Image (cartoon, rainbow, N blue to C red):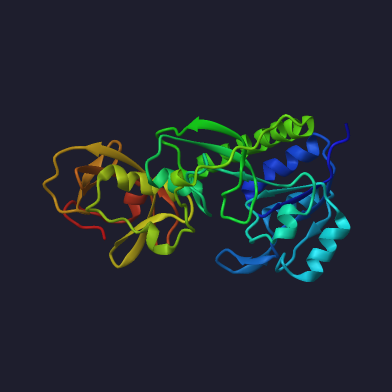
Amino acid sequence: MPKPRILFMGTPAFAIPALTNLVKHGYPVIGVVTQPDRPQGRGRATAPSPVKLMAEDLGLSVLQPENVRHPSFLTHFRELAPEIVIVAAFGQILPGEIIHGQKGGCINIHPSLLPKYRGAAPINWALIRGEEKTGVTIMRMDEGVDSGAILLQEETPIEPIETYGMLHDRLAMMGADLLLIALAILQAGTLQPQPQDDRLATAAPRLCHEDGLIHWENDYRKIVSLIRGLSPTPGAYSHFGGKQLKVFMAGAEAGSVTESPGMIVGETATGLRVAAGNGYVLLQELQLEGKKRMAINNFLRGVRIAPGQVLG
């Protein structure tokens, strides 16, 4: 049986393993749709998306519509006539014609165990909320937000020291492999989509700057979860000496706290101890505004921090 003609839609690095897997296993990718080149980095120079760079390396045709709902793009979509559309973190709301306009449907790779964590930042929020497990879902898209029927799921434990960056990369690979299994079963005609139970749905909204602010009066475990969930980007942060202080790695230490929230207690072998609710946070990797990201021992060589000073 010939493999279906696929139109791939994705933008960030999360989508790259899925795209490369499809090409590696001989699926005819007739085009790659990704977001237009955008200003990025400190210099705000215009740069292509990670998926565009990979698609060009693979010799694939790239489309970059400003709006996939525009009639000109939909005309091009009809001319391409894909049999299946595969979406991985594309970044635009799709019209009904793309969702339902081909016999194989529109399939999405989502990095959570749906219906939990529907939305733009499921990996971040799973970590921030202290989940012990997560996974990937291959789903058939509908007009809702990550609400379509589930085709396949794979669960995985979250390791105690895993950060957003680590978990992101692992789930991207899991999703790419699970996609191939789903496509094979779909071709065989034996895959039965399972509707989601909307009563169990939780939200994973797009992160804003304020989400990263560390409130030192919070439980010490919640603070460490926040730091893990935002590392390396966009980064959890506090303030020291009138400057923003980003925290990329931290440990948790239970204990009876007598100091004020955010007070620096002192340096230990496992990090700089800071008072929090019900325990201490051990700062292990920091970046002070205007400086480089550093391990705590190197950081303390260049920044004077004394016990009794307060963060926040």
| Residue situated in front as seen by the camera: 206 or 249 | 206
Please, which residue is most extreme toward the left here?
Answer: 258
Is residue 56 among the parts visible in the rendering? yes
| Residue situated in front as seen by the camera: 47 or 151 | 151
Q: Is residue 129 left or right of residue 20?
A: left
| Residue situated in front as seen by the camera: 15 or 1 | 1
At x 26%, y 44%, the residue is 220
At x 25%, y 58%, the residue is 311
Image quadrant occupied by the C terminus = bottom left
Is residue 272 among the parts visible in the rendering? no
Image quadrant occupied by the N terminus = top right
Q: Is residue 52 left or right of residue 111?
A: right
At x 62%, y 47%, the residue is 14
Give coordinates of residue 114: x percent, y percent. Answer: 52, 42
| Residue situated in front as seen by the camera: 125 or 307 | 125
Give coordinates of residue 137: x percent, y percent. Answer: 59, 39
Q: Is residue 17 left or right of residue 165?
A: right
| Quadrant of the rendered image containing residue 254 | top left
Q: Is residue 288 left or right of residue 175?
A: left
| Quadrant of the rendered image containing residue 240 | bottom left
